Amino acid sequence: MEKNVIMSPTCELVLIGGSSGSLDVLLKIISSLRKDISIAIVVVVHRKTTSDSTLSELFSIRSSLPVKEVEDKDAIIPGVVYLAPSDYHLLFEKKHVFALDYSEKVNYSRPSIDVTFDSASEAYGNNAVAILLSGANADGTEGLKAIHQQGGITIAQTPETASFPYMPEQAILHAPVDFQMSVEQMIDYINGK
Amino acid sequence: MIQDEEVEVLINDLFELYGYDFTGYSRASIKRRINRLFILDSFPSFAEFRYRLKVDSAYLKRFVEEITVNVTEMFRDPLFYKTLREEVIPNIATKPFIRIWHAGCSTGEEVFSMAILLQEANLLHKALIYATDINPNVLEKARKGIFPLSQMRQYSENYISSGGRQDFSSYYTANYDRVKFDESFATRMIFSTHNLVCDGSFNEFDLILCRNVLIYFDIPLQNRVFELFDASLDTLAYLALGSKETMKFSSVTSNFKQLGKEKIWRKM
């Protein structure tokens, strides 16, 4: 908190990671984002490999912002909601450019939240905010550590409000989590950026 | 953890000492691979890692194998294979002889998938599949046509989703925990090392498949490879990429027309 007040870094990227029980929360967040938001939103959610484009369609219907499933080397544009494609790890080649990777699963997951958060922490440093939602898996904890270490802000969904509290609980136990927030608080927080 | 500057030092060493050119590789991905290996092999410091690479040629081999990603599966993205089956193969079937190039074929799962498609279209006898990779070890595996039995359920499901109507298990013989695909497939395949970074065109093809290889390259290197493919394709021949790869950053993109939603382009 203190470092935030002193340096007040600009937020350029909001990362949201979710697993089991996160879809409703994600839809709520996506549908409540203000239209003129000037940061890029990157969503990494565990899902079956087969249900490919249906999720981005679902997000598109609910969102007033453009939603895009990431393709290799896509440029990152503020005000766009990006979705990690199923069965690839989502990385940042550098600030403002994505990269994809089809290497081994991490935490039984591809995309892995840890992989994306870790890569974002290197490319965006203290310009990144990472949010971890409901899930039954410990993915995301290492990623939040990396984000925090590079000066970014870390947020976990208040476990009591999560359908599967295990994932945010693990993060709160093992990583430096700056804020615990309910869904409504997250929406206000992102819209205030 | 290996830092960005250290990655550049290693890339430079590999080029100067051994001629391996990783300069056009996507930094995000290669840095992850290098760090993974650094941790896996428990090096105490970057200096020791670098030294080992400089003096130990056996370790260099391991490095190159581990840095390149070799994850693949049979009939990966079944709908892609369905399009190959229904739209691409009927168009190349009329050729007296069919040449196909799998660039970056890894352990060969997709090469055998292709051979099965050709067999089912009764074209395998007049087809030749050139399967290449930078890594000789994976080619050795691919050549054998031996894959883990544990994967076959998934592959069989993929095969059926791709429009396959045969009994998938009729194509292989199971032995303990592995299966071996019918010898007749391998007789129509030629395996060879080929480095997309520096090697040139070696034939003209009716179809080139290069799936989930270009994601590891930066845009200038991707462009070089697209030019190489363009020079290796006949008019009306096809180029197939991975499901999240694109030709949109390429200088030769105007020579090609995309087939609907799938990542298949036809040279015009």
Image (cartoon, coloured by chain):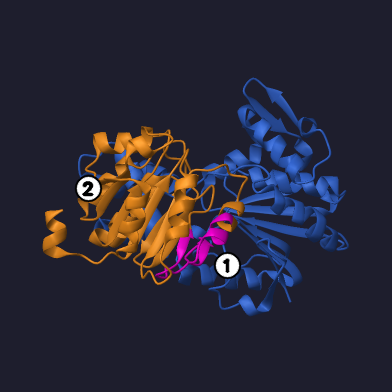
Chain colours: A orange, B blue
Q: Main secondary structure of the magenta part?
A: loop
Q: Is residue A109 left or right of residue B108?
A: left
Going by the numbered disc 2, the residue's amino acid type is Asp
State the residue position of label 1: B200
Q: Nearer the viewer, residue A164 or B43?
A: A164
Q: Secondary structure at mark 2?
A: loop
Classify the position of the C terminus of chain B by image quarter.
Answer: bottom right
Q: Report helix, strand or loop for mark 1.
A: loop
Image point (53%, 57%), residue name: A59
Checking the image for residue A138, the label placed there is none
Q: Mark 1 or 2, which is nearer the eye? A: 2
* Percent of width and height locating residue A43: 44, 54
Q: What are the residue bounds of the magenta stretch? A: A58-82
Q: CA distance from mark 1 to mark 2?
A: 53 Å
The image shows a total of numbered marks equal to 2
The quarter of the picture where residue B156 lies is: top right
- The answer to whether residue A119 is visible is yes
Q: Is residue B165 above or below residue A56?
A: above
Image side of residue B47 versus residue A92, left or right: left
Q: Residue furthest top?
A: B176
Name the residue located 64 percent from the left edge and 43 percent from the top edge.
B109
Residue B242 x, y percent position in the rendering:
60, 57
Queried whether the magenta region covers residue B137, the answer comes back as no
Residue A61 magenta-highlighted = yes
Q: Which residue is mark 2?
A: A178
Which amino acid, mark 1? Gly
Residues at circles 1 and 2 in contact by the CB criterion of under 8 Å: no
Q: Compared with residue B221, is residue B254 higher up or lower down, i.e. above or below?
A: below
